[in-house]
Amino acid sequence: MMPHSPKRPRIVAAMSGGVDSSVTAALLLRAGYEVVGITLQLYSGTQQRKGACCAGQDIYDAKRVADKLGIAHYVLDYEERFKKAVIDDFAETYARGETPIPCVRCNERVKFADLMDSARDLGADALATGHYVQRLDGPDGPELHRAIDDSRDQSYFLFTTTRQQLSFLRFPLGGMSKTKVREIAGELGLANAAKPDSQDICFVAGDYSEVVQRLRPESSEAGDIVDAEGHVLGRHGGVMHFTVGQRKGLGLSGNEEPLFVVGLDAAARRVVVGPRSALAVREFALQNINWLADPAEAALCSVKVRSMRAPVPARVTPLAGGGAIVALLTPEEAVAPGQACVFYKESRVLGGGWITKG
């Protein structure tokens, strides 16, 4: 454990090599904290592509920023942990005929679990990240809220954060715009001030299906495309290529109206299709709920069923065993198993869970 400064609180800054985490470290240093930067190597640099993070060039960029700021910097090899916790889960979810969210799993199982333990081992008083969310003090302790900048808000991807973890976390960028963050980086002369944002599925260098096929080859087995009554309309090259709501790639033509994927039966290797009207859902089930507030507050709230969708009014009814039923006041299209449903009361995140096949 590093010797702790008797004068300044110590905060570990998770530094991915991007501008957001770099400015996070700089703001903490400016605020008077003793800052220690940690960068996680999550996969081999040979896999890296433009817009990725946590490998190769990004580790170098993080080190350059740490040197510029004059803070201690460590690189931790989490490659094997990341593969087991995130990449294997990614492939397994597709093999079940569901649609994964690897960013949520990374936050849940790596950044806010293993990294948090490392921060404590370094004697830190808190762990700070460059996520665009707000941690606000409420009457019952810290609360998770959406970012001020709705276009950058990442609260959907952090719904698995526990109350205990939230007590140890800090998010300095939650009240700022991306434009302001880049301005600060420029003022500080950070080399990555204009660096492009990282993209989803950072560990995929090409087509995501290559990763899934390598780890779960059965998910690429051919099968039937059927309608709701089970009539065979065509063939497909593997359930991993499809998600609920998808229209492209079906290879079907000559129908009275466009057809969309409305369900996946991975065990039978079947892709079920139907008209757009069949995508509308008013009620669905969740599992593995993480509550950040009293469940009673979600009796009437707003929910997001996809990261890029606006919250819509809903009623959430908790069930025994950690599940819940979500009743939407207006139907939503393409509610996909494997995706998350996150509950909000105005800007506050009340909790969330994983959409099941029902």
Image (cartoon, grey):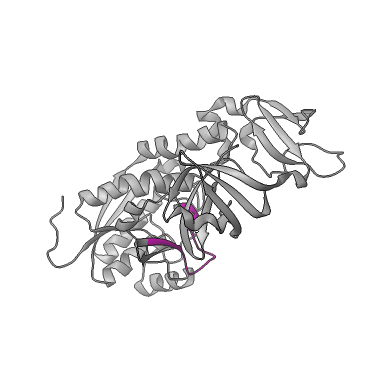
The quarter in which the C terminus is drawn is top right
Of 97 and 28, nearer the camera is 97
Q: Does residue 335 appear anywhere in the picture?
A: no
Q: Position of residue 190 (x, y in %)?
A: 36, 67
Q: Residue at x 53, y 66 (%)?
A: 150
Q: Position of residue 90 (x, y in %)?
A: 50, 38
Question: For residue 154: magenta?
Answer: yes
Q: Is residue 153 left or right of residue 242?
A: left
Q: Residue at x 30, y 50 (%)?
A: 116
Question: For residue 114: magenta?
Answer: no
Q: Does residue 154 appear anywhere in the picture?
A: yes
Q: Is residue 45 above or below residue 306?
A: above
Quadrant of the rendered image containing residue 12 = bottom left
Q: Residue at x 40, y 41 (%)?
A: 43
Q: Residue at x 39, y 61 (%)?
A: 143
Of 136 and 124, nearer the camera is 136
Q: Is residue 266 left or right of residue 186?
A: right
Q: Is residue 66 left or right of residue 144?
A: left
Q: Is residue 256 above or below residue 199?
A: above
Of 22 and 44, nearer the camera is 22
Q: Is residue 230 above or below residue 252?
A: above
Q: Position of residue 353 (x, y in %)?
A: 50, 46
Q: Which residues are magenta?
A: 143-157
Quadrant of the rendered image containing residue 142 = bottom left
Q: Position of residue 271 (x, y in %)?
A: 69, 32
All told, the count of numbered labels is 0
Quadrant of the rendered image containing residue 110 = top left
